[in-house]
Amino acid sequence: MELTTVWFLLIAVLWTGYFVLEGFDFGVGILLPLLGRTEADRRVLVGSIGPVWDGNEVWLLVAGGAMFAAFPEWYATLFSGFYLPLFLILLSLIVRGVALEYRNKSDSPRGWDRAFFWGSLGPAFLWGVAFADIVRGVPLDARHEFTGTLLTLLNPHALLGGLATLALFTFHGAVFLALRTTGELRDHAREAARTLGLLALVSGGAFLVETQVATGTAATWVGVVAAAAGIVAAIMATSRGRDGWAFAANAAAIVAVTVTLFGGLWPDVMPALDPANSLTVHNAASTPYTLTVMTWVAAIFTPLVLAYQGWTYWIFRRRLGGETASRGAGRAAS
């Protein structure tokens, strides 16, 4: 297998991990006004992701770094052409991180709660917009420079992609909270999950089918079916009180969605409306020597990072409620 293919697959894996793990972080933030009816409930919500949210963001940093090192032309075109949406995502992530760190140090945490909500909703929507545009194709010139405007990116297909990821991540947050909490908050999270699951199924299904009709292949239709099956299984598991199975099924659905998008993208990394100007895994890649060195580094350090993050989730696996909620919220500010 060529190293360009290896790194395309690795970048797809990194983005998949980011969406699965950071997806429920976004969902928790979006659900804060709905489920956080009291300060005690809001502390439980924040505490549920307190020990892990910053570790989940590492996947984004590594994915961006891998794109820069393995496919510098892709990175340059993407971050210049999509500058404003990516800047808004970065700003939202900063605001969200500050809110999580400072809400427990403030006498009036409601302002930080609003920052947490908007800092979660923005990326959950904009990532869908960005990837919908990437997979569908954007106007590039012969030098692979983006020639469109912000309105070019905010087309109906991209907005549908944003709604799909927003619904899917919010549903992911609901099943995560059902898994991580006890009592009435757990019941409320399950109720929200049943409604959000249907929204995710409808919006996500419409987006994937439209994407497949435009750019998909026979093989990637398997991903569409798998994504729909995962969401349906998650809804059924939630209704039966099988919170662990619900979370696993929806995580599998997010994996299927991401694999479908990257499968439709291959062998391009940045399709152009004029296929002659598209960036591919070949004309956007670094030198073979660079890719070889990166492959050895990834082979050594990736298992270590995975082991550490797995250990973190194992340590903080207990449900939150009562006293444990206060301790979890405290860790969010540490």
Image: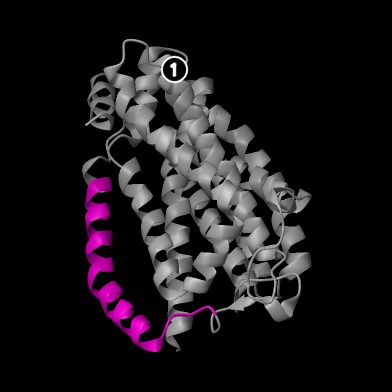
Q: Amino acid at mark 1?
A: Gly
Region of the chain picked out in magenta, as a range = 284-313
Residue closest to the eye, 97 or 144? 144
* In the image, residue 193 lies in the stretch drawn in magenta: no
Residue 220 vertical position relative to residue 62 in the rendered view, above or below: below
* In the image, residue 292 lies in the stretch drawn in magenta: yes
Q: Quarter holding the N terminus? A: bottom left
Q: Position of residue 276 (x, y in %)?
A: 72, 81
Residue placed at 22% from the left, 55% from the top? Answer: 308
Report the predominant secondary structure element of the magenta stretch. Answer: helix
Q: Quarter holding the C terminus? A: top left
Residue 300 vertical position relative to residue 153 in the rendered view, above or below: below
Residue closest to the eye, 218 or 70? 70
Q: Position of residue 112 (x, y in %)?
A: 41, 21
Q: Position of residue 41 (x, y in %)?
A: 39, 18
Residue 208 vertical position relative to residue 194 in the rendered view, above or below: below
Q: Position of residue 52 (x, y in %)?
A: 31, 42
Residue corresponding to mark 1: 111
